[in-house]
Amino acid sequence: MLIVSNVSLQFASKKLFDEVNIKFTPGNCYGIIGANGAGKSTFLKIISKEIEPTTGEISMPKNTRMSVLKQDHYVFDEYSILDTVIMGNMRLYQIGKEKDAIYLKEDFNDEDGIKAAELEAEFSEMGGWEAESEAAKLLINLGIHENLHNLKLKELEGSQKVKVLLAQALFGSPDIIVLDEPTNDLDIAAISWLQEFLINFSGIVIVVSHDRYFLNNVCTMMADVDFGKIRLYTGNYDFWYQSSRLALQMMRDQNKKKEDKIKELQTFIQRFSANASKSKQATSRKKMLDKITLDDIQPSTRKYPFVVFKPEREVGNDILTVDGISKTVDGVKLLDNIKFSLNKEDKIAFIGNEIAITTLFKILEGEEQPDSGEVKFGITITKAYFPKDNTEFFEGKKINLVEWLRQYSKDDSENYLRGFLGKMLFSGDETAKKVSVLSGGEKVRMMLSRIMMFDANLLIMDQPTNHLDLETITALNDGLLAYPSNILFSSHDHEFIQTLANRIIEIKDGKIIDRQMTYNEYLEYMKESKV
């Protein structure tokens, strides 16, 4: 058990946490959620004792071992990959090095022999003789091939380093695992393996992630950071989100009869409980869900942007035809005789080579020209393009948010533009900020505002979920689900792809694999086709 008692944290005049009290228990995975800046990562640092709270304490039973996913990729650069993983249990690593040093002594004496025997006993008890094989197994499962294991960490690429540090955090059966954005830079296979590992882990897992699919698969509890408090909710992210929205709707309908809403919420709880019984975590999760009462579900104070795309006109029969597109960049053939056409109702997720996808989207937008082949849009088509890199839209611009948005609006009145910005959570003095100083997430919200104004019937969106918090990703996801026309998009967000796409196009080695199916169906199809 890990107990957080009366924890507060004050930075200058700002109080980030105020008397937080939580008990984390074994067998549960806790997803820490909250708006950007709420203090999710800071809370993990308090738990792992990297930061001292202003008041309160973190306590756990004696001999409890906590393992933390390290964020600094350079600390272990001079160590071998295997040693880096084994350092996940630093005491075990130190014992191994200490006993090896004793055996190498030229003047080895009886006292050294006694010390070595004591270390050998502790080393064996801690599973030291299996340490290298366990470390190697973790690395292989995460996609780090055996022939790399004796290299120094600095010899690996950034995404490979992330996998090694993740293996370090999982090594040696810790009692508590603390993970901050563990799925960043992981491929699909590694994420899938990590999910299974955490689902079957018997200790405590505390995780911060913007990946809703990951949170939904591994979490049994959500810890919501809101206004300096942290409140625990039973269930995964989707359950927290949907039940809190229902509760908020009930609260807003104070003057109406609540019986229907109460019944809806109870039905929702029962349905979720039934679905959870199919998962590996079912027994404990279902017991918790069965105990939920209406009083346990509180409305969230979290604010969500209002994202809506409304096409000005319906698409005709001819939408888009890509005929034999090829493109070579810096000697690499990214697109090789690409052919596909867009049908009504198609919402296509592009996966695979990200550089090739971005290049294809730029060709569709007209920013780049293909080496050969052509692109044909139907006469009814009006398109809006969301670029992966939005630097040119903001860099060096000395205008405020209202002035920036006015460039793209048919209605240039101050009230309209401020109202529109308010829907995207920019209000009051915030609208006077210069666009050049916006954060990555704020810039994405402004870019979404821009294309919402175009009333397009074809959206081309390259990684629109990058830099966004869970609230904005969810709002964007809902907005695109309600969009009645065609979308071509790419994203790293599994849930985003799975819920939106009815067709998958993978670009690999310049060629495409084109299948009319959902993302999960496509992953299963590819898995079976490799068997």
Image (tube, rainbow, N blue to C red):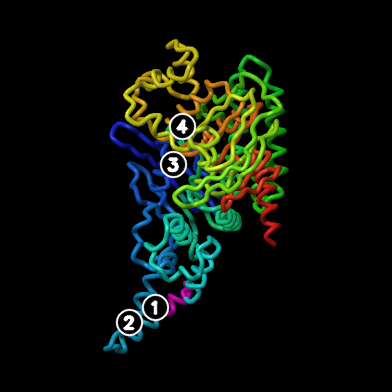
Question: Residue, x 64% and y 52% (percent of image)?
Answer: 281
Image spot of residue 516 (x, y percent): 71, 42
The answer to whether 477 is drawn above or below residue 127 in the figure is above
Q: Earlier in the sequence, mark 3 or mark 1?
A: 3
Foreground label between 2 and 4:
4
Q: What amino acid is at disc 4?
A: Val
The residue singled out by tag 2 in the image is 102
Q: What amino acid is at disc 2?
A: Ile
Residue range highlighted in magenta: 119-128
The residue singled out by tag 3 in the image is 40
Foreground label between 1 and 4:
4
Figure quadrant of the C terminus: bottom right
Whole-number angstrom distance, CA of label 2 to CA of label 3: 44 Å
Which residue is at the far left? 107
Q: Quadrant of residue 77?
A: bottom left
Q: Is residue 15 left or right of residue 136?
A: left
The residue singled out by tag 1 in the image is 119
Q: Is residue 326 visible?
A: yes
Q: Earlier in the sequence, mark 1 or mark 4?
A: 1
> Would you say the residues marked 2 and 3 are in contact, meaning their CB atoms lie under 8 Å apart?
no
Q: What amino acid is at disc 3?
A: Lys
Task: Report crowding for label 4: few under 14, some 14 to 19, many 20 or more residues within 10 A (C-alpha).
Answer: many
Q: Is residue 27 visible?
A: no
Q: What amino acid is at disc 1?
A: Leu
Image spot of residue 347 (x, y percent): 65, 35
Q: Earlier in the sequence, mark 2 or mark 1?
A: 2
State the SS at label 2: helix
Indicate whether residue 155 is drawn in magenta: no
> Would you say the residues marked 2 and 1 are in contact, meaning their CB atoms lie under 8 Å apart?
yes
State the SS at label 4: helix
Image spot of residue 519 (x, y percent): 65, 45
The residue singled out by tag 4 in the image is 444
